[in-house]
Image: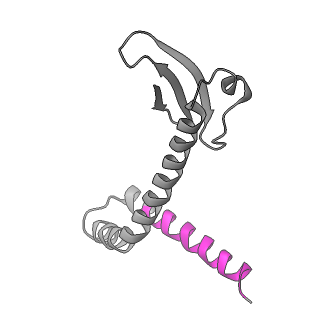
């Protein structure tokens, strides 16, 4: 049985006997690449490559869903942040919020200019 351990930049893949016992580290896969390195592929047994590819698909789908959820909640987030800005934010927090909003707006405008007819 393979175990997938989430790290900030990698997925650590470990083989674990289903009955317990020691773990055998197979290696790490960079999240940005999502490809099994050759040295790891040489260690895989049976359907383990398919297990890893299914895990990659799950991670990719999860990230897409996370982003879509963030987009769906974005209007609420903006409204709540603006309420916080107006009612209780310190001067430093207000600058932080303003900077993020201005940078976001700058990037949206740039994108729209570059993709306009």
Q: Is residue 108 magenta?
A: yes
Position in image of residue 103 (x %, y %):
57, 67
Q: Give the residue drawn at x 50%, y 47%.
A: 59
Q: Which residues are magenta?
A: 97-116
Position in image of residue 48 (x %, y %):
56, 30
Position in image of residue 87 (x %, y %):
25, 68
Q: Name the residue at the top extreme.
A: 21
**Magenta-drawn stretch, dominant element (helix, strand or loop):** helix
Name above or below for residue 63 compared with residue 73.
above
Name above or below for residue 17 compared with residue 77.
above
Q: Is residue 106 magenta?
A: yes
Nearer to the camera, 65 or 98: 65
Nearer to the camera, 50 or 38: 50
Q: Is residue 99 left or right of residue 82?
A: right
Q: Give the residue drawn at x 51%, y 64%.
A: 99
Q: Quadrant of the C terminus?
A: bottom right
């Amino acid at each position: 049985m393979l175990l997938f351990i989430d790290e900030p930049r990698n997925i650590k893949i470990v083989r674990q006997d289903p009955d317990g016992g020691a773990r055998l580290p197979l290696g790490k896969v960079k999240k940005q690449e999502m490809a099994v390195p050759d040295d790891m592929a040489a260690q895989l047994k049976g359907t383990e490559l398919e297990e890893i590819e299914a895990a990659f698909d799950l991670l990719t789908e999860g990230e897409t869903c996370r982003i879509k959820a963030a987009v769906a909640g974005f209007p609420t987030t903006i409204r709540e942040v603006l309420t916080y800005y107006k009612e209780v934010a310190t001067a430093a927090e207000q600058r932080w919020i303003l900077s993020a909003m201005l940078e976001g707006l700058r990037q949206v405008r740039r994108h729209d200019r570059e993709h306009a007819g």
